[in-house]
Image (cartoon, grey):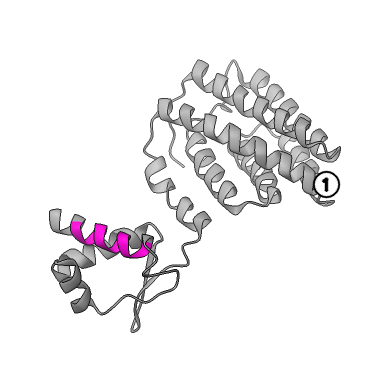
Amino acid sequence: MAATDTALTGLRQMIASGSLGPGAKFPPEPELCERLGVSRSSLREAVRSLAALGVIESRHGSGTYVSALDPAEIISRFSLSVELIPLEGVLQLLEVRRILEANATASAAARQDPELADRLAEILDRLEATTDAAEIQQLDAEFHGAICTAGGNPTVTALTAVIRGRGGHYRIFEPGVEFEAIKETSDRGHRAILSAITLRDPAAAATAASAHIAQTELWLRALRPTPQPD
């Protein structure tokens, strides 16, 4: 593993320093091995590790290239690790999501996309009409994803989606004693967000989004559900 770590560190430094920028082709394998002082097997293992992170791409018959290094694409790969985080870690991530999504919701309200409010209203109509847990989760993700996309920052959209994806394994919209109260409060929170966006009020939009996600944190702390597979 030490040799693989050496190769991985060397490749990362080449990219981070800018000597190999986005889309650049790596030198031939023998040259890289000599430069980094590692074997071919160690180099290939390092390349596979960076490829899994979306940093490197191998093109059959052409060679190995630095990817476009798109931050949203790289962040989306975090889900491979984030899905392992237990509830206490998820609660910490929800604090991050609360900050990011409040900003994204304010941006969505400020950008004044005339079609966004109609789309969100249609999603909420379906969300409020269903009691199916899987459909609630899917529509909730669609609602928040549409807002983040409208906020105009793909990196924020990707990061909040990764956090939301792990949080979705801890399901609070399951049939039980608290279901109706949770559903009613969640629906009301969504409507407050939509109202602020419709009124094109960034401050109110940020406040509504922050309060809505904070409420989710409270439910998770209180219910402490067991994570469920997709």
| Residue 1 makes an appearance in the image | no
Amino acid carrying label 1: it is: Asp
Q: Residue at x 42, y 27 (%)?
A: 87
State the SS at label 1: helix
Task: Find residue 126 and report its horizontal and vertical position in percent.
Answer: 74, 40
Measured as percent of width and height from the top left, residue 74 is found at: 45, 55
| Residue 3, magenta (yes or no) | no
Write the residue at 56% across / 35% down.
Answer: 97
Majority secondary structure in the magenta region: helix
Q: Quadrant of residue 203?
A: top right
**Residue 158: where, in percent of width, then height?**
55, 49
Residue 215 picture location, percent across and down? 62, 22
Residue at the image point whose x is 20% and y is 55% from the top:
5
Which of 105/230 is in front?
A: 105
- Furthest-bottom residue in this view: 61
- Residue 79 to residue 216: above or below: below
Q: Residues within 10 Å of mark 1 (few under 14, many from 20)?
A: few
Q: Is residue 11 magenta?
A: yes
Considering depth in this image, is 186 or 55 the residue closer to the camera?
A: 55
- Which residue, given by chain and number where applicable, does mark 1 sit on? 118
State the extent of the magenta-drawn residues as a range. Answer: 6-15
